[in-house]
Amino acid sequence: MNYEQELAAARIAADQAASVILDLYARFAAIADAPATITTAADRESQEVILKSLSENFPGDAFRAEERTPALERLSPAGPRMWIVDPIDGTRGFARRNGEFSVMIALVENGEPVVGLVLEPATGVCTYAVHGGGCRRGDRSGKAGAVHVTSVATLADATLVQSHSDPKRAATMPVQKLKPRTVTETYSAGIKLARVARCEADLYVSTYDVMNDWDLAAGHILVTEAGGRVTALDGRPHRYGAESPVHHGGLLASNGRLHDAAIKTLWEPEAPARPNSG
């Protein structure tokens, strides 16, 4: 099936939401210590814009989204075709005014994402994909082109993208175990997944045990259509649109070549400490 009509509608909805977000962002007073759980009026207004736009075009589809808003309450919550929306992924980046946030929209059919986009309002970069059609990147200039995952084949040469970590603490578990050459950090799972798809990172590892459909679905298809692979940390597949939106077991997104080695290394038991011979 060709999903270009759905992709076009998703891009229009995302652009409309980005306009609302950027207007509020320009007037937002930064919150330096914004917690991971923060939500803002921009999240809710963005979601209302997206749901209104998509539901007018596809009134028979189901919808799932992060925020409880009036539009979501009026729409069908279940069905074989489901739109999954994160109106602002990385709200901490919005609240801290560092630009690290995205709009994520996916269409899932029978558990699999068939359309996905991640739009980064602060930069205008949009990464998008349809099932069987590859992954592309566009920007405000109107230029667009196909993107592909990297060809890096060893963990020692890899670039790992992860959430911001506390520099006062030890390196995160993925960094300690995988020992990548380079580590980059950003808010927004959508941005991290898009970076893997766009050949800007080789791996994204999330050790959060609880994630949701809207955290993953849009970025998932970007990576797979760019030639990569997305699973839980133990290699189990992620499926979407079930009765519960919750996913357990973390996330591993990679260029594919590194995937099995990363799973094996992440699950290797810690070496026992050597006894003191003094």
Image (spheres, rainbow, N blue to C red):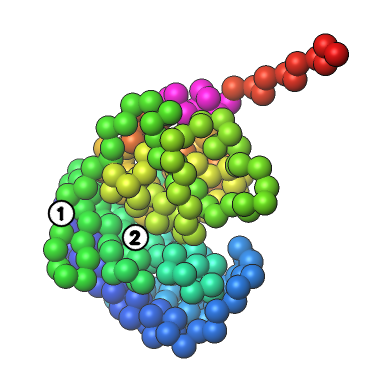
Label 2: which secondary element: strand
Residue 149 drawn at (x, y percent): 28, 40
The quadrant of the picture occupied by the C terminus is top right
Residue at the location (41% across, 60% down)? 84
Residue at the top extreme of this rendering: 277
- Indicate whether 37 appears above or below 137: below
Q: Amino acid at mark 2?
A: Val
Disc 1 packing (10 Å; few <14; some 14–19; many ≥20): few
Alpha carbon separation for disc pair 1 and 2: 15 Å
Residue 1 drawn at (x, y percent): 18, 48
Residue 252 drawn at (x, y percent): 46, 38
User: Pointer 2: what residue?
Assistant: 118
Q: Over which residues does the magenta segment extend?
A: 260-267
Q: Amino acid at mark 1?
A: Gly
Whether residues under marks 1 and 2 lie with C-beta atoms below 8 angstroms apart, the answer is no
Residue at the location (21% across, 61% down)? 138
Residue at the location (25% across, 72% down)? 12
Judge by depth and name the residue closer to the eye, 195 or 276. 276
User: Pointer 1: what residue?
Assistant: 145
Residue at the location (32% across, 69% down)? 123
Label 1: which secondary element: strand
As drawn, is 85 to the left or to the right of 273?
left
As drawn, is 216 to the left or to the right of 130?
right
Q: Earlier in the sequence, mark 1 or mark 2?
A: 2
Q: Main secondary structure of the magenta part?
A: helix
Judge by depth and name the residue closer to the eye, 227 or 50. 227
Residue 274 drawn at (x, y percent): 75, 16
Disc 2 packing (10 Å; few <14; some 14–19; many ≥20): many
- Indicate whether 23 appears above or below 64: below
